[in-house]
Image (spheres, coloured by chain):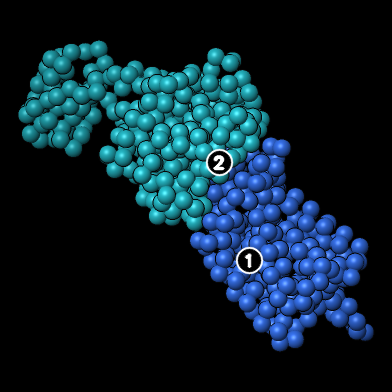
Chain colours: A cyan, B blue
Amino acid sequence: MTDYALTLYDVAVRGLRGVSLALLPGEIAGVVGPTGAGKTTLLQVAAGCVHPTRGEAWVWGCRITDANARKFIGYAADHAAFPRALRVREVLLYYARLHAAADPERAPHGLVREALEFAGLGAARNLLVGALGHADMQRLALAQAVLGGRRVLVLDEFLTNLDAIARRDLRGRIARLAAEGAAVLIAARDPAALERLAARALVLREGRVVRAGPLPALLGERVLEVILDAPPPEPPPGFKITDAGIEAPLAGRTVESALAMCRAHRLAVRASRVRVKSLEEIVLETHDTH
Amino acid sequence: MRFIHCVLAEWALVAPRFTRTRLGISLLALGATLVWLGSRGLDPVTVALLAGSLGAILGAAGVAGSDNERRALATALSHPTTALAIATGRWVALTGPAALLVIVCTATVAWRPGIVTAGIVAAGAVGSCALTFVIPLGNATALGLFLLMALAGAVAPERLVAMADPGFVRVAAASVLELGPALWHYRDIATGDVGALAHALAWTGLGVLIARAFIARRRSSIR
């Protein structure tokens, strides 16, 4: 069990019905699903904020409910709050003092310096929290989560509502942490936010994992999009109607055979292209099929 | 030692809160008002008790009562500390400035160690009680408690029930004044009344423990 950075076994609590997962050091797992699927509850259990009514949760072989577990797990909640009257470095110094209390060999100011540097907050260190923009608030949330060299990060809606540049920057910082051996569990209601980050995805629906696997395998399926001059009265078998025409997963057949089927149905094909499935489509599929 | 360090981490935030929020200006205004009332004939014990209790309520509102501070408790709990350390630290953080206010006001009006002790002990008890209200319910309750203490805190319960047919409401109000932290009771600390001191210390301990329970509940309220 201690080979895993984070282990959840059959955990259940309100809104979550028996979820298991194990995260290896250096692994980034994304949790996606619609609002109310149980993403935040799952992350709260993983961070030790909510005690499961059933099942067990461990971090580095330590029960997640133990006070010591908080030395290993960093948590950035959705809309994490910090005292608005304090400066960025004062907020981090407050948390650093708590870590130094648990481990007297650590100097609080050194921990703050590392966290500021890691999160890219050096220039904002003297700003009041109340004056920070959303991207810097997320950086502060990341800084406090990594503070003290914590090796398991639980990040809720961390990349949501960010501009493309800030999202890329934070994605890079998380990826660097993972490359250094930290395990990351990150949730997003917008699946596209995780496509370039997570190595593995769990699709949640109504408190259960309905689909899970490595992202390349989940997204590996190719889809043939066919643009038609006019919408067909009925799509060929295996195809579904889209705004511009029809589309179907290739699922073993060739592009030529799929297009031949279109021609056999007397459809006026204007253009076609093959693309890979998106994580959003997988979430929608699981929503439609369950 | 770990507990003490966690408590001191809370104390370290007093200075920025005092200078950058309304806490500092509110305490200064309260102190100026009480010194003025003292110069106009308000007795020094009442000045000390009001400085301690009202200063502690303002402190509770400043260090733990705002929506943002209450939400930030959940973030603090994701670090290696405990709800008891946070509750104790916030109590120390709100009692410290109130105790300083008591010392300044008493030194200005009429310095006597017994009066200072009564004011500081009242600050501890009322501050602890205020914490138990502002952490779950916010600053609106701090305002209510402030007005209650300022207007009725010095009323002895006997004045409500010393009549032939006091009625349920008066008996209930008298019970609240009897059991809750009340200035009429803590006046006697100035003269060395052990019962009043024990009442205040019991409220201090009970308030911190109840505040601890409310803080622990906020761990799962991160949203």
Residue A149 vs A134, above or below: the answer is above
Q: Amino acid at mark 1?
A: Leu
Q: Amino acid at mark 2?
A: Tyr
Task: Label 1, secondary structure: give it.
Answer: helix
Q: Is residue B66 visible?
A: no
What residue do we see at 64% from left, 26% from top?
Answer: A63
Report the residue marked by disc 2: A95
Residue A175 figure quarter: top left
Q: Nearer the viewer, residue A237 or B63?
A: B63
Residue B200 vs A102, above or below: the answer is below
What residue do we see at 70% from left, 73% from top?
Answer: B105
**Horizontal and vertical percent for residue A124?**
38, 46
Quarter holding the N terminus of chain A?
top right
- Residue B58: assigned label: 1
Quarter holding the C terminus of chain A?
top left
Q: Is residue A108 visible?
A: yes
